[in-house]
Image: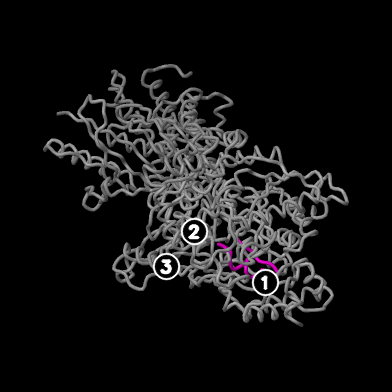
Amino acid sequence: MEWETVIGLETHTQLSTQSKIFSGASTHFGQPPNTQASAVDVALPGVLPVANRGAVERAIRLGLAVGGTINRRSIFARKNYFYPDLPKGYQISQHEIPIVSGGTLHITTTAGEKIVRLTRAHLEEDAGKSLHEDFHGMSGIDLNRAGTPLLEIVSEPDMRSAEEAVAYAKALHALVRWIDICDGNLQEGSFRCDANVSVRPMGSATLGTRCEIKNLNSFRFLERAIDYEVRRQIALIEDGGRVVQETRLYDADRDETRSMRSKEDAHDYRYFPDPDLPPLCVDDAWINAVQTAMPELPEAKRARYEGSLGLSSYDAATLTQSRDMALYFEALIERLAVARTAHLARAKLAANWVTGELAGALNKADVDIQHSPVGSDALAGLLERIEDGTISTKAAKDLFDAMWNGEATGPDAADQLIEKKSLRQISDAGALEAIVDHVLASNAPQAAEFKAGKEKALNYLVGQAMKASKGKGNPAAIAEILKRKVMGQAPP
Amino acid sequence: MKDDYLTGATLTELSSALAAKKISSVELIKAYLNRIAAVNQTLNAFITVDPAQSLAQARAADARIARGELGPLTGIPIAHKDIFVARGWPSTCGSQMLANFVGPYDAHVIDRFNAAGAVNLGKTNMDEFAMGSTSESSWYGPVRNPWHTDHVAGGSSGGSAVAVAASLAPAATGSDTGGSVRQPAALTGTCGLKPTYGVVSRYGMVAYASSLDQGGPFACSAADLAVMMNVMAGFDARDSTSLDRPPEDYSRSLGAPVATATAKQPLAGLRIGIAREHFGPGLDADVEAAIRAALDALTALGARLVDISLPTSPMSVPAYYVIAPAEASSNLSRFDGVRYGYRAPEYTDLRDMYCKTRAQGFGPEVKRRILIGTYVLSHGYYDAYYLKAQKVRRLIADDFTQAFKACDVIASPAAPTVACRLGAMTADPVQMYLNDIYTVPANLAGLPAMSIPCGFGNRGLPVGLHVVGNYFSEAQMLGVAHQFQGVTDWHRKKPEEVA
């Protein structure tokens, strides 16, 4: 039988506020245990929560970015359960009315584009951490993370493969960083996915029984856990078994999921509206202010790059993978005055360099583009010299390497290095003619072949001339002179 | 200085004495501490007294007075219900669960009194986690009524009520979730006020039922309640339910609570609502007689009685005993033995630690309410209980909105009976719950309400007149009470000294 996989994701994004969602304690990661826990976070008797406006604002930003509904009145609720790293004995979350309802996210896979619907996004607080090592059979509790603001973003079960699930997770990851609500640090747990996975016979309209897989803190684990889980469920059903609704944990070391708890021993969380927090009211003025401060979103940028800059959809998609890359690219073409002259070739040149040479170097060195040793001003200076024929593409690559190594920075870096390294291209016809004459004289057979119509021979001759010029000759000018001399064309 | 100077002394009198240097704050505190040392063994009004800390505050207050920085409460001792967390003071909430818990910070109310230069005289006894109407559920033993020491003090703020009634403190703080200030005030012959919900910050006041809890003062007179309110009330950004309103002077209407007042009739034009539901079966005759007499005194001052109806009020006790336990079951989850407070001495694993800690650390009334609250919030019961109770709550508030179109304040008994004997209610919690019938509606609606002494019933036990006002009408209510106290002396009556 052929099976269809159905996946929905719940993503906990840690919001990038300075302080916690209901207390003034710092959210700074990696501090000594229990040094970032205030009286509120420790849940001392008598303390009360106060909602963090910055967290709410970030949730609004997400809602606007995905085209969801910002609920003008949402409700904080208590989710009650006992656990040592949950100091109050309940987690403050949003249950019946979340701050964001609906919305969509566009994803791209090898099969093409697809729209994934979002169910909701709600604000909640993170729990602390239980530490089970180093305490000689006891457990330690670190409440530094307790009260860290989270936005839980829930998708509809719209994905049909692990590849789509990963594409969704990556698109969401890029978006939350784009709109600057989450640092997206997977290692530190700033972006955590739970996957709801089920299978059903292809063509079936009803959903199969789902399992929720927790603890997926990398895109690779997400993909592998779903693949494993799908295989497990299909094998189970084909052997005459039945999938049981349960929560499963992905074990990366063994590359398998295993049961954590079944629906039967699921908690009754006894949700009810938190009487310590009035309804969260968001008015139009606030939403408008957030909207106004919102950066141009990746889709709008992509459309603009393809439309008014004439870039390919591939280039446009690559340049909008992160906001920092797009901002770098825009700073670059601003310096190249692309917009003013509508010089589309320049935009293409800039795009090629950013997605090619620069991206390659960044990748290799594992450096973020905002920390690139070659600034957009320096790269703009370089591209201008390519365009005006001062240097060859080959020389430009050498220059780029020199800039990368910190030999020169700033808008004049290219010019400084051209002088220093005497890389100025020889375009002077007189000087080049002498070189060409020499090359023709010492390569008579190839000259004859070229004359007989072999284009390949021309490339060889140009190469020899470039060699003779120590790489400084303008290859286009050399080719012109060669053609003229061999074909006996009159000088222009 | 003779102790009897203190008996019935008002805040204003004490402040004048301090200003005139007739007495120092240190002398005043010592005198009160002596009284407490003499009678607290009998009355059990205080859980903690700490002469060293109190006297340190008194010395600081004397220094302020010497510098001429004298506010209305500078140097004056105030007793605090042990529900308020105070830095350096045990803050037990009357529970074994917090018996070893010393406050690491000050509640907003404590902050305010400290800023005013008042002296913390000690922490008063209370029903465990404010759950009870008799102050018998305290892990520290029952509070006794100074009018008859084999009778209860009312609750849950029984310790504060008795401290004021027995002149162990000139004024005290309490908290009121379903009547926990007003009912013990009535049963001990003191004045007690529960402000409009949101007027006094709940920050640092250990939560019982968050949507109902409100701090309030006890004192010997309405005028003193106003002095206390001027300190306790005010916006606090740390409490999201605190109301951001301009500060007000709660004493401003003492002389003329109604615009239509005349010299001979200071309450002329005041409409006092009398709800027919409040004077039916269940109300003891001795209490009703005292209330009727008080209403006569009020009409003699010019007030007019208006017949009103609060049709949903019979549902208030059932609704309260769904909502309050629901919130309590969640609020008390933090007492789990993990971070502070009581932990069972022996356990096998985490679950066992939780179970034993909470089984041993909480008393029966607290456990009963946690069980009720957990039940009414459970999957499948939420709609039938919690949601329905919230709807009843809305209707009760609507009743009041309707009623206040026809009247300015609503008067009733504060409790259907005078104080019962110790132990009389413990076997029958439902009977105890039903005694909250007059006080609970104001909490459900968030309205201000007060009890003032208005006579005595059986066995010479005090009766309290309950007054509910519209939102933010505390100043007017205090004015009405002040006018009443101008022509009566029930509030000046003091019990005979107990041995």
Q: CA distance from mark 2 to mark 3?
A: 23 Å
Q: Earlier in the sequence, mark 1 or mark 3?
A: 3
Residue at the disc numbered 1? B495
Which label was assigned to residue A28? Answer: none
Circle 2: residue type? Asp
| Residue B428 coordinates in the image, percent (x, y) | 45, 59
Q: Which residues are magenta?
A: B154-174
Which label was assigned to residue A41? Answer: 2
Q: Badge 2 local density, few (<14 within 10 Å), some, or many (20+)?
A: many
Give the secondary structure at mark 3: helix
Q: Is residue A56 left or right of residue B412?
A: left
Q: Mark 1 or mark 2, which is nearer to you? A: 1
| Residue that lies at the very extreme toward the right in this rendered image | B263
| Residue A127 coordinates in the image, percent (x, y) | 42, 54
Q: Residue at 77% of width from left, 73% of height from top?
A: B64
| Residue A266 appears in the picture as rendered | yes
Q: Mark 1 or mark 3, which is nearer to you? A: 1
| Residue B425 coordinates in the image, percent (x, y) | 49, 62
- Contact, CB < 8 Å: mark 2 with mark 3? no
Q: Residue at 56% of width from left, 41% of height from top?
A: B312
Residue at the disc numbered 3? B361
Give the secondary structure at mark 2: helix
Circle 3: residue type? Gly
Asked whether B88 falls inside the magenta stretch, the response is no
- For the residue pair A108 and A480, the one nearer the viewer reads as A108
| Residue B298 coordinates in the image, percent (x, y) | 76, 51
Up-down relation of residue B261 to residue A235 (above or below): below
Q: CA distance from mark 1 to mark 2?
A: 46 Å
**Chain designation of label 1:** B
